[in-house]
Image (tube, rainbow, N blue to C red):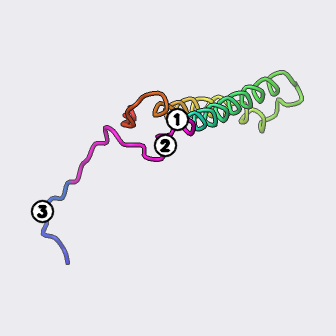
């Protein structure tokens, strides 16, 4: 079945907020979630910082492979610094409504 050419279909939607339902209302579990996210965040930042420090300080690691690795580490640090802290606010505020912007 084909639609006539004069019919125009337009669908648009704008996401302004969403509701996180995966986090528990139990205070102890919220603290556990926060600690898990924080430890993953800190381990990733530390690992990427150590990669940058190691490659920059050792002249034997100044090859193209490590050049790309030293450039990927800061971008990974930026990505993890935007996603993980945004997943932690539901534990710190009473409302579970969360705005992605």
The segment highlighted magenta reads 11-30
> Of circles 2 and 1, which is in front?
1
Q: CA distance from mark 2 to mark 3?
A: 44 Å
Q: Position of residue 70 (x, y in %)?
A: 72, 30
Query: In the image, is residue 49 part of the stretch drawn in magenta?
Result: no
Report the residue that reaches farthest toward the left: 6
**Horizontal placement of 66 versus 36: left or right?**
right
Precedes in sequence: disc 1 or disc 3: 3
Identify the residue shown where x is 10% and y is 63%: 6
- Using residue 30 as the reference point, say whether residue 99 is left or right of it: left
Q: Position of residue 64 (x, y in %)?
A: 77, 36
Single out the mark in the foreground, 2 or 3: 2
Q: Which residue lies at the image location 71% right of the left edge and 36% below the top edge?
A: 68
Nearest-to-viewer mark from 1 and 3: 1
In the rendered image, the vertical position of residue 2 relative to residue 85, given as above or below: below
What residue would you read off at disc 1?
27
Kindly indicate whether the residue at mark 3 contacts the one at mark 1 (C-beta within 8 angstroms).
Answer: no
The disc label shown at residue 50, or none: none
Q: Quadrant of the C terminus?
A: top left
Dot 2 crowding, Cα within 10 Å, few <14, some 14–19, many 20+:
few
Q: Earlier in the sequence, mark 2 or mark 3?
A: 3
Measured Cα–Cα span from mark 2 to mark 1:
10 Å
The residue at the point 49 percent across, 32 percent down is 91
Helix, strand, or loop for circle 1?
helix
Considering every residue shown, the one lying at the far bottom of the view is 1
Mark 2 = which residue?
Answer: 23
Mark 3 Cα shell of 10 Å, populated few (<14), some (14-19), many (≥20): few
Residue closer to the observer: 90 or 64: 90
């Amino acid at each position: 079945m084909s639609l006539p050419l004069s019919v125009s279909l337009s669908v648009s939607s704008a996401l302004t907020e969403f509701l996180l339902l995966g986090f528990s209302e139990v205070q102890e579990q919220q603290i556990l979630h926060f600690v898990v996210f924080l430890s993953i965040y800190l381990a990733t930042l530390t690992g990427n910082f150590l990669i940058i420090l190691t490659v920059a300080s050792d002249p034997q690691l100044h090859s193209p492979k490590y050049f790309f690795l030293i450039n990927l580490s800061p971008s990974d640090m930026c990505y993890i610094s935007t996603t993980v802290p945004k997943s932690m606010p539901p534990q710190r505020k009473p409302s579970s409504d969360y705005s992605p912007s």
